[in-house]
Image (spheres, helix red, strand yellow):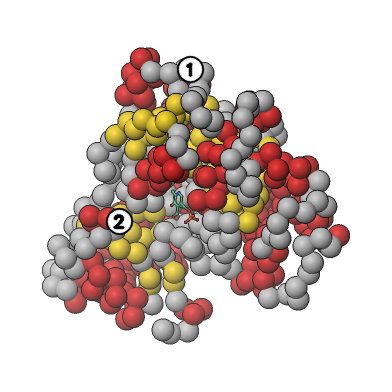
Amino acid sequence: MNDLDDYLLMIPGPTGVSTRVRKVMSEPQIGHSSEEFQESFIELLNLTKEVFKTKTGYPFILTGSGTVAMEAAVTSLIEQGDRSLVLDTGHFARRFGMILESHGLDVDYLNFPFGNHADPKMLREQLSHDEYKAVFITHVDTSSTVMNSISELVGEVKGANALSIVDSVCGVGGCRVEFDKLQADVVISCSQKALAAPPGAAILMISQEGMRHLENRKTPIPSYYMNLKRWKELMDDPRKYLATPAVQVMLALLESFKMIISEGMEERWSRHRRMAEAIRAGIEALGLEFIAEDGYRADTVTGFYVSTGKAASIRYTMKHEYNVEVARGFGDLRDDSLRVGHFGNINRKEVSAFLSGLEFTLAEFGSKVKEGVAVDAAVPFITPELRQSRSAR
Ligand SMILES: Cc1ncc(COP(=O)(O)O)c(C=O)c1O
């Protein structure tokens, strides 16, 4: 592998981490019960609320990956006898289903073809004849690269008086999520995607209504670690101990949150949108097809088809010759498609390196497209000023 500073990690998580955040991780070890760490953790909880755009939400940050947050939501809010509905838009939606099933909980699935969004009308229809305690929604399903309209879906769930539990692991920090406006009961995320920190912190934001359900549940939570009632004591008072947190990861996440807040959420969402549009324009110019349907392509990850059976070799060439690492497609599409993550610190440099690397690689694999088309198509999105000055010439 070449010099890591030139190397672009563009898989759908974890993402590249800035020097500033990496530096924090290489500081001397501090104790998890030190005053310094406790102060930092309180600041981290406060900044989490800013990033999620909430004044009323209750934040939880646990050591663990995103799946820990998913399972903690299930074990803490759903009880035996409760019925849940999963909107199946891909692998990560089904993961919610698998977690529910592995706890012996009752779950129905509303299925959508792979690459299609969850249709709010179909959800309304389902909710009109079946009653659920909770509906599980995936904001951006990293497997299908679909971005669902969470505001419409949560609106339907609210109308049916159920809890809405949203996995925005691949959304928060890159796609618009305004917790108070959204009115979801739980939004889940984690550190290693659009929040641009290393893996290891699982995040949940819970509404007042969600907290009431947590406090008033009838049966004990069947988990020691993934038990939000226990964790609440620690979130209320970070001087308490439950389990040793990944101190460096939490400090790195705090540093990243400071950078996110100084960029500004609107600017950050808009940068992600522009970079996603640039990537989509470049991919389209190369004559490739997307996995996700038009209008529902994510601003954080893009999936596209390549020549049948060639995904592994194209990925390998991009990584070893052009220093850009992308991921293969998911499941059945593994051999025929690729996924590129474009979140966190994504900017012009990464977009143009990805598009030119892809274009050169495809040329090696026999593509006949005109040289430079991919980056050229991306120019209006990544450098609008450049496009204007070009057309004025
Ligand atoms: C949408 C989504 N949900 C959940 C997860 C699980 O997160 P983790 O791998 O951190 O457990 C992922 C991971 O890629 C994801 O993309």
Q: How many marks?
A: 2
SS type, badge 2: loop
Q: Quadrant of the N terminus?
A: bottom left
Residue 35 location, quadrant:
bottom right
Q: Amino acid at mark 2?
A: Phe
Which residue lies under the disc numbered 2?
Answer: 330
Q: Earlier in the sequence, mark 1 or mark 2?
A: 1
Horizontal and vertical percent for residue 329?
Answer: 29, 58
Horizontal and vertical percent for residue 326?
Answer: 36, 66
Evaluate whether residue 390 shows in this view: no
Is 325 located above or below residue 104 in the figure? below
Real-space Cα separation, disc 1 to disc 2, in angstroms: 34 Å
Mark 1 close to ligand 1, CB under 8 Å: no
- Return the mark for residue 159: 1
Evaluate whether residue 63 shows in this view: yes
Crowd band around label 2 with a 10 angstrom C-alpha radius: few (<14), some (14–19), many (20+)? some
Residue 139 location, quadrant:
top left
Question: Mark 1–mark 2 contact, CB under 8 Å?
Answer: no
Residue visible at 38% across and 18% down? Answer: 130
- Return the mark for residue 6: none
Q: Nearer the viewer, residue 365 or 236?
A: 236
Q: Quadrant of the C terminus?
A: bottom left
Q: Is residue 105 left or right of residue 200?
A: left
Extreme residue in the right direction: 35
Residue visible at 70% across and 56% down? Answer: 243
Residue visible at 53% across and 27% down? Answer: 163
Extreme residue in the top direction: 128
Q: Amino acid at mark 1?
A: Gly
Q: Nearer the viewer, residue 1 or 332?
A: 332
Is 329 located above or below residue 158 in the figure? below
